[in-house]
Amino acid sequence: MISYLLRHVRDAATGAIVDARLADGRVDLGPSIEPRPSDEVVDADGRWLIPGLWDAHVHFDQWAVSRSRLDLRGTATADAVTRIVGEAVLENPEDEAVIFGFGYRASVWPRQPTVAELDAVTGARPAILISGDMHNGWLNSAALALVGVSGIDGLIDEDRWFPLFAKIEPHVPDTASAVRDAMQAASARGVVGIVDLEFAANHDVWPERLAGEPAPFRVRTGVYPDRMDEVLARGLTSGDALDEHGLVRMGPLKIISDGSLGTRTAHCCDPYLDAADLTNARGVQTVPAPELRRLLGLARGSGLDVALHALGDAAVGEALDAFEQTGARGSIEHAQVIRWEDIDRLARAGLTASVQPAQLLDDRDVMDRLWADRAERCFALRTMRDRGVTLAMGSDAPVAPLDPWLAMAAAVHRSADGREAWHPEQSLTAREALAASTDGINRIRTGDAADVVLVDRDPFAGATPEESARNLADMPVAATFVGGRATHWGMQ
């Protein structure tokens, strides 16, 4: 394997110009390192060296295929969506393939959509549209028949929606090519690791797709309760290697304990502010407390970490109860709104808050409408960090792009459209945001795994949060290394 000697890199943590050798999977830093015959010597010309970036919450296949789907983000009405879909049909009137669209958020629409209006622009061609938070779907009659569903006249809610992913997947064109492209794109943004929480047998999918080749980044594979028995039967525990290179490892048990803001099903302590038409004014706890305790107890006894989706503050409270009662370890995923006292419980329990800051860019207006009475407790990153909670940032891609730089920018400025920052008192600094995006590594030291990134600019530049966020959002990545192996090379 090639070893690299990177001359004249700037250690981003200290600002010092040093040399860095990447050999045998490890980093060696020094003021002037003598080259070896096996070294490929590269003049980094003062580029900044940072720890490799992680995305702590990804649905990788969904992200991969969403990149080529009809873009429905920002649509203000159901009519706006049907116009986009209708235009796509007219562009290729002879095409019979399923139309896939992604990104609508029906909770902000003045009325809810119907199957009939989607039928009117698609005819017999199947259309499968997926919400921006992935918690509901809008299918026309042809698509409903394709997946064997009847009795639906509008959106498919999350209880019925999630089980349909397996039925939809066979109709997705060329997933393998989309996955390859998405892997390259992630490496080009400095990604050295992901936690993949796709709705699949990820512990088998990743080794099979790599076919013995080393992965372009480290992967921790999540498993859901419906596949937990097969993982337990094989004796797999979190951290176990699943491939010969040790890059793909067993990750956590993923549990979805409540819904989402967009579907108004996140389980909250107080009613949604427009709850008049809701059967469940406070959202839905989809996994009752006894079942949560059973699953977490099973995970603890089996050596599995737990990634527990709890988006609303009541769901976070239930999740913390279950962690405390069972002694399970792991993370609360999302914690989009949280009670102040539960932040302290989160810290005491030693749990990680796995958060997705870029989602606030889409959700701020919805939160101001539905959660205006609790908005100061939404995406409470500053308070969590100050009270000792470990933060791990991610995207929940495809809900937000798999781009840690965008997540960092959102955490720092909490706006991306020219408006004032949304609750700026909860912002992080660029250094704090980077630390939360690097799997717990604040700086590179000799002997660390050679999962490092070279960038063209100072990641901590910017006199104001807005300037800092702009600097982060489009950060040029010159090279990415995983275990000392170059997975992206953009240097001239």
Image (tube, rainbow, N blue to C red):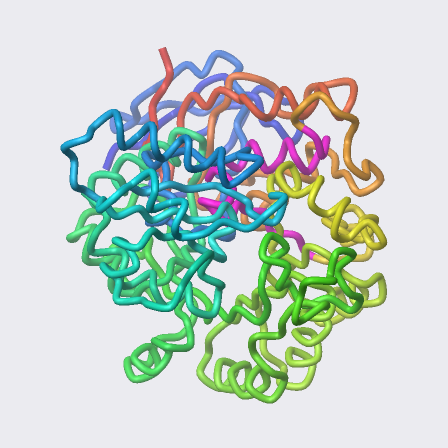
Q: Is residue 485 visible?
A: no
Region of the chain picked out in magenta, as a range: 390-415
Q: Nearer the viewer, residue 162 or 144?
A: 144
| Quarter-of-image position of residue 449 | top left
Q: Nearer the viewer, residue 240 or 149?
A: 149
Residue 183 on image: x %, y %: 32, 39
Report the quarter where the C terminus lies: top left
Report the quarter where the N terminus lies: top left
Is residue 87 inside the magenta stretch?
no
Q: Nearer the viewer, residue 199 or 385?
A: 199
Q: Describe residue 439's horizontal placement relative to residue 482 as left or right.
A: right
Instruction: Identify which residue is drawn at 34% across, 83% down.
Output: 229
Q: Describe residue 266's horizontal placement relative to residue 271 as left or right.
A: left
Question: Compared with residue 463, is residue 302 higher up or lower down, i.e. above or below?
Answer: below
Residue 110 on image: x %, y %: 63, 44
Residue 63 on image: x %, y %: 38, 44
Is residue 399 inside the magenta stretch?
yes
Question: Compared with residue 110, is residue 371 higher up or lower down, i.e. above or below?
Answer: below
Q: How many marks?
A: 0
Residue 386 on image: x %, y %: 81, 51
Q: Describe residue 390's horizontal placement relative to residue 171 as left or right.
A: right
Instruction: Identify which residue is drawn at 73% across, 47% down.
Output: 367
Question: Compared with residue 200, is residue 81 higher up or lower down, i.e. above or below?
Answer: above
Q: Nearer the viewer, residue 102 or 246?
A: 102
Instruction: Identify which residue is drawn at 58% across, 25% down.
Output: 473
Instruction: Identify which residue is drawn at 27% across, 32% down.
Output: 89
Question: Compared with residue 181, is residue 219 higher up or lower down, i.e. above or below?
Answer: below
Q: Is residue 377 visible?
A: yes
